[in-house]
């Protein structure tokens, strides 16, 4: 793209351009060639990111391949490409990077044929203990990946933009939803204060940064797990991903699963994770997980307030954040 071009992502929908990339870099079994390519438009957020879905038929297989092309205004695709490559190499995901177009900052990758865990739950498909255990083990495997020396990824920082990356509270609004602004900011300040009081393992690891049920794929025909979406990777304490997943599992799924069942799944998930990592959970670790559960709750609340008619859900998420922080305070 040149400086004269508006950000519209049109290049990833250009069939001639896409065919050149896929024919050169897409690995097709048994030396097959691309026989047909269909392109579907899929906007990520309609402003800053665009995604194209590629349905690919080859001469060597009756199975259709699913690939994607992504272009982002913030130019983070190289980091996502390298992160996905690292995760694929270590069998964390079957998402496979195909090519990174440095000139146009475009990421091409093979998708995973399967169902998001969230959709799995919403459709009342068979959620069993082993599936939850596998998710815990897979996250543990991600966290113990050795970080290559030449791999640059930022360390997680507990700053306000963590919960409000789009800066939706930058201006004072008269809209009813903005009544939540001060409460959210006060709760975030409490998180920062409590973090400084909590003892924690200073060791940081390769973290997903947005580990929720929508980013876990259960592959079709079996229960193999793939962790997808590496757009938020960072170096962080492992409790970050644990807290996000536990909070999002509860918040996203409480309409579909009884509360006691959610709590049982959370317990199985944590036990599986810590067994794989050979870590014994204590009150300090539990409190650090609560801290990141509260942070995730505030992030969810801000996101909900940026959309229409979500004030009730946002208020519920804020209340969850308060509950998580009270759990920490009561432990002192």
Image (cartoon, rainbow, N blue to C red):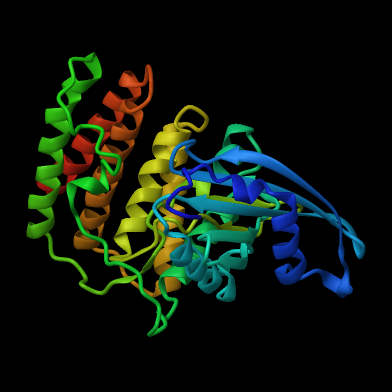
Residue 180 image point, x, y percent: 19, 25
Front residue (pair 122, 129):
122
Question: Is the residue 252 above or below the residue 265 in the image?
Answer: above
Residue at x-position 24% and y-position 61%: 285
Q: Nearer the viewer, residue 237 or 178?
A: 178
Residue at 23% from the left image edge and 38% from the top image edge: 321
Residue at 74% of width from left, 70% of height from top? 24
Instruction: From the top left corner, tell me how far across and down residue 7 is, in percent.
Output: 47, 44
Nearer-the-camera pick, 143 or 9: 9
Taking the image as drawn, is residue 248 in sight?
A: yes
Residue beneath the point at 45% across and 35% down: 252
Q: Position of residue 191 (x, y in %)?
A: 14, 47
* Relative image position of residue 240 (x, y in whole percent): 31, 57
Q: In which quadrant of the rendered view does residue 320 lie?
A: top left
Q: How many marks?
A: 0
Side of 81 where 278 appears, left or right:
left
User: In the image, is residue 176 above or below residue 5?
Assistant: above
Question: Residue reaching furthest front?
Answer: 4
Q: In the image, is residue 144 above or below residue 47?
A: below
State whether residue 202 is above or below residue 268. Answer: below
Can residue 332 be seen in this snapshot? no
Q: Would you say 8 lies left or right of 150 here?
A: right
């Amino acid at each position: 793209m040149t400086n004269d071009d508006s950000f519209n992502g049109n290049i990833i929908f250009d069939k001639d351009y896409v065919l050149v990339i896929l024919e050169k870099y897409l690995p097709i079994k048994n030396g097959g060639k691309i026989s047909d390519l269909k392109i579907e438009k899929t906007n990520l957020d309609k402003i800053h990111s665009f995604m194209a879905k590629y349905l690919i038929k080859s001469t060597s297989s009756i199975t259709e391949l699913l690939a994607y092309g992504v272009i982002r205004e913030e130019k983070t695709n190289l980091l996502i490409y390298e992160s996905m490559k690292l995760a694929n190499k270590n069998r964390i995901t079957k998402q496979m990077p195909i090519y990174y177009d440095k000139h146009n900052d475009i990421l091409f990758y093979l998708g995973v044929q399967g169902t998001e865990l969230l959709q799995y739950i919403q459709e009342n498909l068979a959620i069993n203990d082993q599936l939850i255990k596998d998710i815990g083990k897979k996250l543990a495997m991600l966290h113990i990946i050795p970080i290559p020396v030449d791999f640059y990824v930022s360390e997680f920082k507990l700053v306000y933009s963590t919960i409000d990356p789009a800066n939706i509270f930058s201006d004072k609004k008269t809209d009813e939803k903005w009544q939540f602004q001060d409460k959210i900011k006060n709760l975030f300040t409490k998180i920062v204060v409590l973090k400084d009081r909590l003892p924690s393992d200073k060791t940081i690891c390769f973290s997903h940064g947005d580990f929720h049920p929508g980013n876990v794929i259960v592959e079709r025909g079996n229960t193999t797990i793939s962790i997808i979406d590496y757009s938020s990777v960072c170096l962080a304490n492992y409790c970050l991903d644990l807290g996000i997943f536990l909070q999002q599992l509860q918040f996203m799924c409480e309409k579909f699963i009884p509360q006691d069942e959610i709590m049982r799944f959370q317990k199985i998930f944590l036990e599986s994770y810590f067994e794989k990592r050979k870590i014994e959970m204590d009150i300090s670790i539990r409190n650090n997980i609560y801290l990141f559960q509260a942070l995730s709750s505030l992030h969810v609340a801000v996101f909900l307030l940026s959309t229409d008619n979500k004030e009730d859900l946002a208020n519920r998420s804020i209340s969850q954040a308060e509950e998580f922080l009270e759990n920490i305070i009561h432990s002192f």
